[in-house]
Amino acid sequence: MIRVLLADDHSIVRDGLRRLVDGAGDMVVVAEAADGREAIRKMDEFLPDVAVVDISMPGLDGLEVVARIRAAHPKTAILVLTMHEEEQYVVRTISAGASGYITKRAAADQMIKGIRKVHEGGRYLSDDAAEALARRMGKGPADRTSLDALSTREIQVLRSLALGKSNREIAGSYAISVKTVDTYRFRLLKKLGLRNNAELTRFAIQNRIIEP
């Protein structure tokens, strides 16, 4: 049996995923997590074969969870399941160490296929995620957006600031200093041509980094 961890902050989503996974016949949900930090704890406790992780979670965001799981549990396959279809997320998540990426509007059978595929050591992208990646690969320098100029850590800090987190909270989440958070904030304002946190929040909403 493939042992699966589900990490998503919506209980109704986890309930649906559990029924889907447990009903597949060759896999079982061994643990669930409602936020990033709980996902890391449950990983250490249950050592699942596959971790299904949402990107937009409280505490630690999904990109950070993926990176930490990959570092601490290299044998665990990571499948991202998310509402985000933007190419930025697909590229950054795979770069962080995920083996697959499925959007929440993909058919249920793609989820099961994805778990099996990454468990076997392969890669899996849902149809819309593969489309987004193809668009990204086809872009030239002239097609790049302001998001392309940001590092993954800058996007994480941007998302945290847009969610109203303090610099101290952000520093604690990513094990960096408050001064470093200040530096990231300054870089974000400069790169994006913005003036304050309110404009950073508006930018994050417009670019679907956070939901309004």
Image: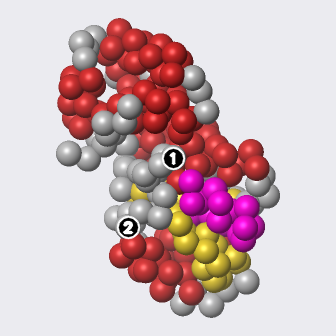
Q: Where is residue 14 shown, x and y percent of the image?
A: 45, 74
Residue 190 versus residue 54 in the image, above or below: above
Residue 198 relative to residue 99: left or right = left
Residue 52 versus residue 63 in the image, above or below: below
Q: Secondary structure at mark 1?
A: loop
| Quadrant in the picture for the C terminus | top left
Q: Residue at x 24, y 37 (%)?
A: 205
- Amino acid type at mark 2: His
Q: Secondary structure at mark 2?
A: loop
Q: Residue at x 41, y 80 (%)?
A: 16
Quadrant of residue 147 within the rendered picture: top left
Q: Residue at x 70, y 77 (%)?
A: 2
| Quadrant in the picture for the N terminus | bottom right
Q: Where is residue 158 shown, x and y percent of the image?
A: 38, 29
State which tag comes first along the sequence, 2 or 1.
2
* Badge 2 density bin: few <14, some 14–19, many ≥20, Cα 10 Å: few
- Amino acid type at mark 1: Leu
Q: Is residue 39 magenta?
A: yes
The residue under label 2 is: 10
Q: Nearer the viewer, residue 182 or 145?
A: 182
Residue 75 relative to residue 10: left or right = right
Quadrant of residue 120 within the rendered picture: bottom right
User: Can you tell which mark lies on residue 60?
Assistant: 1
